[in-house]
Image: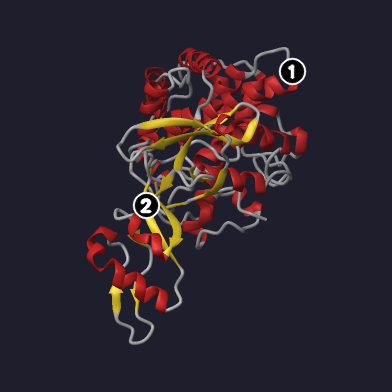
Amino acid sequence: MQQCDMLAGKRRGAASLRLPIRPVARRQERAFAEVRVVKERSTYAKTVPVEEMFRYPEAVLVNDIVSPEDGILIVSRGRPLKNFVRKAEVITGALRSWGVREIKLEFEAQVTVEEMTTLLDHIDPSVRQIDREVSGKVVDRLSGVHRALSGSDAKTFPREEIEDAGRMLSEEIHKSSQVLLSLGVAHDADEYTYVHSLNVGLLAGYLAKCVQRSRGLAYDITKTAVTTGLLHDIGKAKIPREILNKPGRLTDEEFDLVKTHAELSFTLAKESGVEDSLVLSGVLGHHERWDGSGYPQGLKGEKIPLLARLVGVADVFDALTTKRVYKEPVSAKKALSIILANSGTGFDPGICNVLLSGVGIYPPSTVVELSDGTVGTVALTGDGNLLQPKVLVKESGGDCRIVDLQAAGLYIARCLDLS
């Protein structure tokens, strides 16, 4: 069984994707110093025929080229091929003589997520994204609430501010076609908790909108889901920062204290005047797991409140795609794969299907190679078409265009490994 949350690896041993789900459930919420790296330019790897390697002068070698005869280093990894263009014929000839037919190269990703959101605004204005000003206001409100509660005896917070933030975000979600490219970026340890809460609120609200549509619900649960996401970690304000931000292994006592945040969040929300039972049960139960291995009540299956199941999936997805001091973030596609691998054990299979339908098999920001050899970055999932999303392609001259794979008769040949 795959690990549904990679947050535990550093303090309990080497990170693994195949740890049983039960110990993961009791280690999921560590708020180490975290920074999402969407603003850094990532790279991807592609294997090409030896004869074609020097067509990509900006690419770098993933591995050293070493003579099998005498062990002499011919070309060291990490250096751009443009430095060796004059020796191209000699190098390719030597590789062929050694029986090497393909070589693995590393390329700089065409666009960052931040650049993509800007480009989409200009290339395809019909793509409605979450208003960044609204997101900023929500983060400011969450920051104020957390700071007021932490380090003091305060047991309540201004409920109206969070509920109004939930209203603003839910209105944005109803106008937006996607949310993955609109997730916030945490710049330091203190900021992480409330930026994470913003992201969980956005993701939970988006999933709720999809659930409402697929199940034909007569009532709107989007705002309720967003508010639940915004409040799910409010109890961490009452847990010492030195524990939340501890980069090393937690003791059993420390982890037991961290686990109390779900109940603390519930209590703070209730005492602050939150009366919606759906919100309260969602906050309390966001660490419950489909197979009964979660906490604090060990609920199982559909006994877990719907909003708790929604927020639980959103919580893990954002945590997996966030960088922490002890692990690198995984791609959105990898996070999706991990969650789907735990469908029916850690997570509600129905919610997992909604997530798949909402973000697609190839989520936004996935670098792919198309059937015509073009490399691009997935920008949008096509309505009802999981296999042929819209892809942002950057031309050699620097111009960008959106390719609708279905309209163009193209398909994704493969995903390229992102580092």
Percent position of residue 54, x then y: 33, 59
**Where is mark 2, residue-wise?**
107
Mark 2 vs mark 1: in front? 2
Picture colour scheme: secondary structure
Q: Residues within 10 Å of mark 2 (few under 14, many from 20)?
A: many
In terms of depth relative to the viewer, which is nearer, 159 or 401?
Answer: 401
**Image quarter for residue 343?**
top right
**Amino acid type at image mark 2:** Phe
Q: Position of residue 325 (x, y in %)?
A: 39, 51
Q: Is residue 260 visible?
A: no
Residue pointed to by mark 1: 216
How far apart in space, not on screen, are marks 2 and 1 (Cα)? Answer: 45 Å
**Quadrant housing residue 389:** top right
In the image shown, does 91 or 302 lie closer to the viewer?
Answer: 91
Q: Quadrant of the N terminus?
A: bottom right
**Residue nearest the viewer, comparing 338 with 20:** 338
- Where does the image place residue 176, in percent across and percent down from the top left? 51, 19
The amino acid marked with disc number 1 is Gly
